[in-house]
């Protein structure tokens, strides 16, 4: 009987030893949770089709200005990091094994992810529109086919930038943020869309993304509307003072004793 009672205890010790061994091996294999780009604990991991995994922010920054290839093995990769689903299993493992470090990484990546919301592709067109206007487009260029596919699968927004010269964006340009209301894809890849102009924005940074047939991207911030009423009122208030200062000079120049500028009357 005593031997039978000791059997569960032995089994418990074996399970505890196995758990200890598993935990130690997990700590040894912690480098497998390292992002190959930032060499830090992977945060919001995204696994691309070739099987490699990166932080969302790291993959986003790597693919913004380079060809659509895996940063590790250079395999073709047309993943949109800003909207791609997170590898839930790896995220849970990283958060479970390193809770404090993962929380810190989340705070760091949150600041970078705020830039995602202020980054959009650019559509050039020679027409002046205003917030609230409807925009109807027929997209047939290859770069805009890329644009519409990405927009529809993410936040449905792009920058409408009027340009009457070289179709290139520059820092300081004022554009319009458009939201796609409806989009119909034709069999040959063209697209018919209806969008609403939401607000004015100011371009802070711009580049052309490789592998997209010349699709322009930009970072932006809201355009602060200037209060012209205050400026006009101030200018109008300054007009009387300006003319009052000139009245004595004008009077003296018209008087008979006004010096060289005076008007001589005939006797």
Image: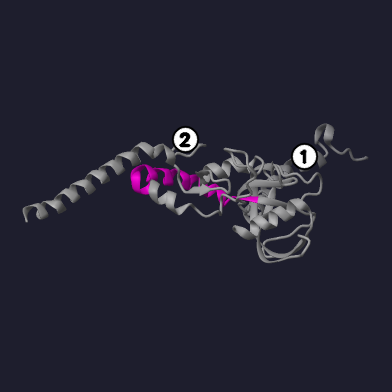
Q: Earlier in the sequence, mark 2 or mark 1?
A: 2
Of 248 and 152, the residue lying toward us:
152
- Residue 252 tag number: 1
Answer whether residue 9 is visible to the viewer in this image. yes
**Residue denoted by label 2:** 39
Residue 160: image x %, image y %? 71, 55
Of 190 and 8, the residue lying toward us:
8
> Circle 2 sits in a helix, a strand or a loop, which is it?
loop
Residue 77: image x %, image y %? 62, 46
The residue positioned 73% from the left and 43% from the top of the image is 246
Of 264 and 78, the residue lying toward us:
78
Residue 87: image x %, image y %? 48, 52
Of 245 and 260, the residue lying toward us:
245
The residue positioned 43% from the left and 39% from the top of the image is 32
Residue extending furthest left?
2
> Circle 1 sits in a helix, a strand or a loop, which is it?
helix
Give the overall secondary structure of the magenta segment.
helix
The residue positioned 59% from the left and 38% from the top of the image is 73
Q: Is residue 22 left or right of residue 151?
A: left
Residue extending furthest top?
260
Q: For label 2, count other residues whose C-alpha is less than 10 Å away and answer few (under 14), some (14-19) or many (20+).
A: few
Asked whether 153 falls inside the magenta stretch, the response is no
Mark 2–mark 1 CB contact (< 8 Å): no
Q: Which residue range is magenta in the image?
A: 95-120
**Quadrant position of the N terminus in the picture:** bottom left
The residue positioned 78% from the left and 61% from the top of the image is 188
């Amino acid at each position: 009987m005593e031997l039978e009672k000791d059997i569960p205890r032995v089994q418990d010790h074996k399970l505890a030893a196995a758990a200890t061994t598993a935990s130690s091996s997990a700590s040894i294999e912690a480098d497998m949770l390292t992002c190959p780009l930032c060499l830090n604990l992977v945060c919001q991991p995204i696994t691309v089709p070739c099987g490699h995994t990166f932080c969302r922010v790291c993959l986003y920054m790597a693919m913004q200005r380079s060809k659509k290839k895996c940063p590790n093995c250079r395999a073709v990769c047309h993943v949109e990091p800003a909207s791609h689903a997170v590898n839930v299993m790896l995220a849970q493992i990283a958060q479970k094994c390193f809770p404090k470090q993962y929380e810190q990484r989340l705070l760091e990546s949150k600041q970078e992810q705020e830039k995602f919301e202020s980054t959009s592709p650019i559509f050039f067109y020679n027409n002046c529109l205003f917030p609230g206007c409807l925009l109807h487009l027929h997209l047939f260029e290859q770069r805009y086919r890329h644009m519409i596919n990405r927009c529809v699968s993410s936040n449905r927004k792009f920058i409408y930038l009027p340009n009457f010269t070289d179709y290139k964006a520059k820092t300081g340009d004022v554009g319009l943020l458009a939201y796609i209301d409806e989009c119909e894809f034709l069999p040959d890849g063209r697209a018919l869309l209806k969008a609403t102009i939401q607000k004015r924005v100011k371009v802070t940074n711009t580049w052309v993304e490789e592998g997209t047939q010349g699709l322009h991207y930009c970072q932006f911030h809201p355009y602060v509307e200037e209060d012209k009423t205050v400026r006009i009122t101030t200018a109008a208030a300054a007009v009387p003072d300006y003319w009052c200062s000139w009245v004595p000079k004008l009077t003296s120049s018209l008087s008979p004793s006004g010096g060289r500028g005076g008007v001589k009357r005939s006797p």
